[in-house]
Image (cartoon, grey):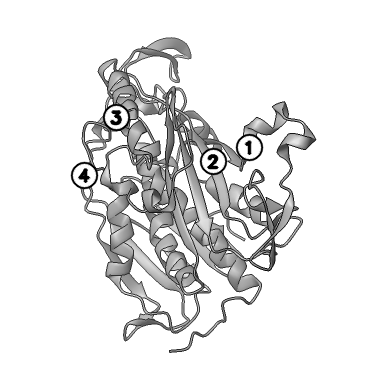
Amino acid sequence: MSANSFGRRFVITCFGESHGEVLGVVVDGCPAGLPLSENDIQVLLDKRRPQSTTYSTLRKEKDKVRIVSGVFRGHTSGAPICMIIANEDVDSTPYEAFRRKPRPGHADFTAMVRYGGFNDYRGGGRFSGRITAAFVAAGAIARKLLSMRGVEVYAHVAQIGNIRVRRQPKLEELKKVYENDVRCAIPEDVKLMENELKNAVEAGDSVGSMVEAYAFGIPPGLGDPLFHSLDVDIAALIFAIPGVKAVGFGLGFDFPSMRGSECIDEFTVREGEIATSTNKSGGVLGGLSTGSPLHIKVAFKAPSTIKKNVRTVNLESLSETILKAEGRYDPCIGPRAVPVVEACLSIVLADHYLSQGIIPPVLGD
């Protein structure tokens, strides 16, 4: 399969670059008969757009989606669904300097080496966070499929810099996450995160973040070990989001400091069904869902484009030099990544639901 494609039954193929004419995605394998309109996609794309210029890039894209195939008379036809989004607010001027002076922490140098200098370097090209608009578009279809089986997917920012949420969010709080600029579901932590981000911006710097995502309504036994287990596929697609450096399930990186007696989820009977008394594993055991909510943590590094002088190399003279990056960028990835993480988790779940026949290839009325 192409390196630009993901999935077995619900297959997405992304195309386009940050400053190209368009970007988009082809979704192949979506069942016929799903009611679908451009508005279904647009609602989620709008959530990906910056909410505040204080905490995000000054680039303002409308992200208006066009469905150009695969939908007929308001329903999916069973054919590949192609969705296109135009790039309109483009300024490539600042990126000319990066051809000679690659930005530390970015793919400027590695992409140049990999593609012999023929890569589109404008705005980061194929390696820009801009490409995640395609993930969100495909994820909107996946979420609509999953909703037919009672599955709900939510995410929020659980950490910005040194400010980390002090408790897990309630479901009703997750549903209101887009009501604040940092997209944190815990009301008492929002202001602290805003101040942390504000301090980084005022210092001409950036800051790291963590997004937590949850999926409710997943039955036990979903997944195909070994190499298409549920957590393997989730981690694989999440790592396609630019800036991701770690993915954990449940307690994640807390596990190494714990003993077995502390980290197991004991079984119990709840309303006549087998369940776990806790969810430290994040809803996955042996690569299969346990029936508890999926719970994943996604760590994003601080964006590498900052308003500070950094050392790099002049590729023409092979000498060390100083770079002060110009351009439009996000000082923190987490807030804008919330709908992207939701989309990626939804895509993987839809793929597994279709692979195991839980969702049929043709939907009824």
Whether the residues at callouts 3 and 2 have beta carbons within 8 Å, the answer is no
Q: Amino acid at mark 4?
A: Lys
Q: Amino acid at mark 3?
A: Lys
What residue is at 34 percent from the left and 28 percent from the top?
193
Residue where numbered disc 4 is placed: 60
Q: Which mark is residue 252?
A: 1
Are there few (<14), some (14-19), or many (20+) residues within 10 Å of tag 3?
Answer: some
Whether the residues at callouts 1 and 3 have beta carbons within 8 Å, the answer is no
Left or right: 202 as drawn, with respect to 323: left
Q: CA distance from mark 1 to mark 2?
A: 7 Å
Q: Earlier in the sequence, mark 4 or mark 3?
A: 4
Whether the residues at callouts 1 and 4 have beta carbons within 8 Å, the answer is no
Depth check: 301 or 103 in front?
A: 301
Q: Which mark is residue 23?
A: none
Q: CA distance from mark 4 to mark 3?
A: 25 Å
Q: Is residue 288 above or below residue 177?
A: below
Residue where numbered disc 2 is placed: 297
Q: Is residue 288 above or below residue 253?
A: below
Whether the residues at callouts 1 and 2 have beta carbons within 8 Å, the answer is yes
| Discs 4/3, front | 3
Residue where numbered disc 3 is placed: 191
Q: Amino acid at mark 1?
A: Gly
Q: Quadrant of the C terminus?
A: bottom left
